[in-house]
Image (cartoon, rainbow, N blue to C red):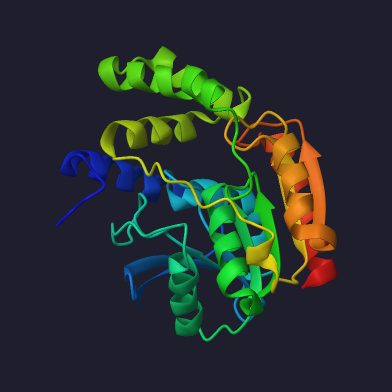
Amino acid sequence: MKTIYKSLDGKEQILNQYEEYLTQFDSLISRDYVQTRFGRTHVLVMGKEDRKPLFIFQGGNCINPVTLSWFKGLLEEYTVYAPDTIGHPGYSDETRISASDKSFAQWTADLMDHYKIEKCAFIGPSYGGGIILRIAAFMPERIQCAILVNPAGISLGSKMKMIKEILVPMISYKINGSSRSLRKITDVMSSKSMKQLDESIIGNIFKHTTLEQDMPKLTTVEELRGYSAPTLAITGTEDVFFPGNKISQKAEGILGDRLELIKYQMGHFPSVAHLEKIEHDIKIFLKKHY
């Protein structure tokens, strides 16, 4: 069977950190395995029972609890469904599927149908934002409203900058395991605010997995002709992967008056202070539109 992991030991290290991260959540957690047309998907169900459903997708090349933790404050008000993205680190099947066609929309439809959710709100950071845009393109009727945080699927940062600031130190880290090389990467990703455990997880994913290199397709105006849901985009001007200024301009073009836009001077991984602001922004948006 094809695997995204380079060794069983490396996989075990990453899944142990997944479990360690879950201990940081105060909410009760139930864990389901849902069979989809693309394979078995592990879903964390958290928050308040019998509240409005809220789907939260994880960031790419990461583990679900890391980016889910950015939205902890929402667990007090919603029933949160957080699937491990299929083909990414976590407990879901390791089948990689295309983020350029309707595959992720179909995968999401299978999950929503399992939980008998016809329509709901979605949150997606990074790669997860790109998944939401695939749903908007192929299944717009199932989105009540959407929140994109430093999202993929809209515009990309400078290739030269990513090569210099991410790829070169990553190659160095893979060769010699240098903590200095890893710190260079995580400082760029987070504007020097990344937590130690997050840095360790990122390092293990770099070392022990075959990274997903295909980002979600850049969304076009034509793809969103049928999409009318209110959408909040929160971007970081220091984001090396999806720079806020480029994202903002392009998002306005493809989303028009459906878009609410907020920019912060932050990296791809928000600091604790920025996460507090983001939580406040999201709660206001959801109360207005959901």
Q: Splitting the image into 4 quarters, where does residue 143 fall?
A: bottom right
Query: In this rendering, would 252 be left or right of 13?
Result: right
Q: Splitting the image into 4 quarters, where does residue 170 fall?
A: top left
The spot of residue 195 in percent (x, y) is 54, 31
The spot of residue 238 in percent (x, y) is 68, 28
Q: Splitting the image into 4 quarters, where does residue 147 fall?
A: bottom right
Q: Is residue 246 above or below residue 131?
A: above
Work out which quarter of the rendered image holds the N terminus and state it: bottom left
Q: Is residue 73 above or below residue 36?
A: above
The spot of residue 243 in percent (x, y) is 67, 34
> What is the tally of numbered marks visible in this picture?
0
Q: Is residue 219 above or below residue 136?
A: above
Q: Nearer the viewer, residue 25 or 109?
A: 109
Q: Is residue 210 above or below residue 31?
A: above
Extreme residue toward the front, this view: 222
Q: Residue at x 43, y 13 (%)?
A: 180
Work out which quarter of the rendered image holds the C terminus and state it: bottom right
Q: Nearer the viewer, residue 105 or 148?
A: 105
Q: Residue at x 48, y 35 (%)?
A: 198
Q: Residue at x 35, y 14 (%)?
A: 178
Extreme residue toward the left, this view: 1
Q: Can residue 23 be seen by looking at this rendering?
A: no
The spot of residue 249 in percent (x, y) is 77, 43
Q: Nearer the viewer, residue 154 or 270?
A: 154
